[in-house]
Amino acid sequence: MAQALWVKKDSLAETQMVDLPDAPLAEGAVRLTIQSFAVTANNVTYAVIGDMFQYWNFFPAPDGWGVVPMWGHAIVTQSNCPEIAVGERVYGYLPTATTLDVIPGKISAGGFTDMAQHRQPMSPFYNQYSRLAADPEHDPAHEDARMIFGPLFKTGFLIADFYQRNDWFGAHDLIMTSASSKTAMALAHCAKLASPAVRRIGLTSAANSAFVAASGLYDQVIAYDAIGSLPVQPAVSVDFAGNAAVLRAIHGHFANDLRFSSTVGMTHVAARAGEGTPLPGPQPQLFFAPTEALETIKALGPAGFAEAVGGAWASFIADTSRFVRVAHHSGLAAARDVFLKTLAGDQSPETGIVIRL
């Protein structure tokens, strides 16, 4: 019998493990048995803004409950689709569960799209599955890294590309909150490659300062309470924390010298309240990676985009292997525990968590 982890939408620390009834496989459908996925702060963001961006709609649950999406690997265990064979492995957007039924469409050697009706209103970015046998991004030696960093890395790459396409809005400094987060590290790496003249300033907690500094990804690392010590000169800000007080401190310190302000994630869940009053300087703009991906592909072309991402990804993985270790846990109960620990802000940035089912 299959299982799923449900999370209370309005109280994310409330969860329940449920058994799913066996159901016949629909015509044209494929049943995926989930093998592994990573649990990161990115998954917490999916839950926090689940209603706003329809993240809860990908894997439906009863009213009031939701299934948190994860990125991971699965194997085909049943198939009513002649083009997809039992035993084939895929990578993509998966529920916190043991199985997922998909309806493959737009099938190619390298992947397919889930054409399930309820998923069509959402971004197609999340409905695509890579077939590992012909996936150029698949490296058996780096499956863990792809689950932990893959989607976060691409977000960081896209943010760096967005700012580079806009000449960094004339800024000299790139200020990143939650500098220990995986997306911030990806952005710092990609910015260093693309625009080394732009100074990368990482803001983090005192507890994470040593780890962030040791990464070598930032030109300067400071604690949140030292924002006022930064020189006031043209800068851009990328907020991954969702901490209203920190964002207000950045805007208040730089005011009109802050040339652009992006908000991306919400790693500081308990501190995200307090918005509403306009901030000094430019008002923060939400960065939505799937939309920006289309702009970047348009600018670089599909082949150019794949080449640019691939090159940056290879160097990033080599970099992060120096200072991030991978820990493996087994089962949905372990996934629940790691999610709750990450939600509470207690998960160490030095460890990437992979769940094996």
Image (cartoon, rainbow, N blue to C red):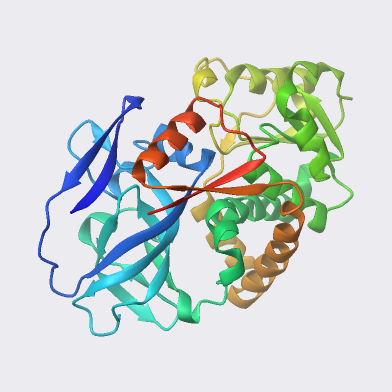
Give coordinates of residue 105: x percent, y percent.
29, 74
Q: Nearer the viewer, residue 204 or 238?
A: 204
Picture quadrant of residue 19: top left
Q: Residue at x 61, y 73 (%)?
A: 301
Position of residue 314 relative to residue 98, above or below, is below
Q: Quadrant of the N terminus?
A: bottom left
Q: Residue at x 64, y 37 (%)?
A: 349
The number of discs equals: 0
Give coordinates of residue 240: x percent, y percent.
61, 35
Left or right: residue 184 compared with residue 329: right
Is residue 122 visible in the rendered image? The answer is yes
Picture quadrant of residue 218: top right
Q: Residue at x 24, y 48 (%)?
A: 3
Q: Residue at x 28, y 49 (%)?
A: 59
Q: Nearer the viewer, residue 71 or 74?
A: 74
Picture quadrant of residue 108: bottom left
Left or right: residue 84 compared with residue 188: left
Position of residue 242 relative to residue 21, above or below, is above
Left or right: residue 89 compared with residue 1: right
Give coordinates of residue 33: x percent, y percent.
30, 62
Give coordinates of residue 51: x percent, y percent.
34, 36
Q: Nearer the viewer, residue 302 or 95?
A: 95
Position of residue 44 relative to residue 90, above or below, is above
Is residue 123 visible in the rendered image? The answer is no
Q: Nearer the viewer, residue 280 or 182?
A: 182
Q: Quadrant of the C terminus?
A: bottom left
